[in-house]
Image (cartoon, rainbow, N blue to C red):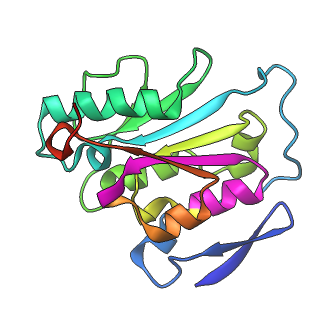
Amino acid sequence: MYVVRVNDKSVLNPFSNSSLSSVWEPKPRATRARAAFVPSGRTLHLVDAENLMGGPFAGNLALRGALREYTIAAGIRPLDHVIVALSVSDVWPEARLVIGRGRDGADNALLSTVSDVDWMASRYDRLVVGSGDHAFAFAVAAFRAAGLRVDVVARASSLSMVLAALASSIGLIKLEKEGLA
């Protein structure tokens, strides 16, 4: 592990000894002030759909259920931005779709969209990560250090303890096969 500086604050990178450490590094900037044209309270949602639905082969019903549960748990509002990562989708047409390939492909695709922490922090008041995957822990730490509230929405069975410890709050969802009515 090592510590990087974001906006003159220390941020722990728990992945410095893994393949993930080279994937995502924050791009620091001078300030965190929100841009004047940005509405107050706007939220950026990073949704790892495959993680929320229980894997890439869980099926369309599981995907729709997971996204429905995420929408409720995260409290998506009209001015929020949603970025979804998965292999293939026509399920959430309003969201920006990013596609990754290979191991941790969806995670890496989502993380690449938010590498400039201070720029993002100047445009959002809150970040919601729709995944329990440990790959998002460094991003959560960096956004918290930049002053944002960072919530995590995940299945209990896939929630990383490191991610849970770093988040401002946790929203747990269940899939139909896990007892969702």
Front-lying residue, 158 or 42? 158
Examine the image and state in which quarter residue 5 appears: bottom right
Q: Indicate the position of residue 162 as horizontal and vertical percent values.
A: 51, 70
Q: Indicate the position of residue 35 as horizontal and vertical percent values.
A: 84, 29
Name the residue rendered at 43%, 24% in the picture.
Answer: 95
Q: Quadrant of the C terminus?
A: top left
Q: Indicate the position of residue 130 as horizontal and vertical percent values.
A: 44, 44
**Is residue 147 on the magenta stretch?**
yes
Examine the image and state in which quarter residue 146 appears: bottom right
Front-lying residue, 20 or 73? 73
In the depicted structure, whether residue 70 falls above or below residue 131: above
Write down the region rendered in magenta. 139-157
Q: Quadrant of the N terminus?
A: bottom right
Q: Is residue 104 left or right of residue 16?
A: left
Counting the numbered discs, the total is: 0
Examine the image and state in which quarter residue 67 appears: top left
Q: Indicate the position of residue 11 as horizontal and vertical percent values.
A: 71, 70
Q: Outermost residue, top direction?
A: 78
In the depicted structure, whether residue 132 falls above or below residue 60: below
Front-lying residue, 24 or 64? 64
Q: Is residue 15 left or right of residue 53?
A: right
For the question of whether residue 25 can be seen, the reply is: no
Name the residue rendered at 74%, 33% in the picture.
Answer: 123
**Is residue 13 on the magenta stretch?**
no
Name the residue rendered at 54%, 77% in the picture.
Answer: 14
Front-lying residue, 150 or 112? 150
For the question of whether residue 53 can be seen, the reply is: yes
Name the residue rendered at 26%, 52% in the picture.
Answer: 101
In the depicted structure, whether residue 113 falls above or below residue 16: above
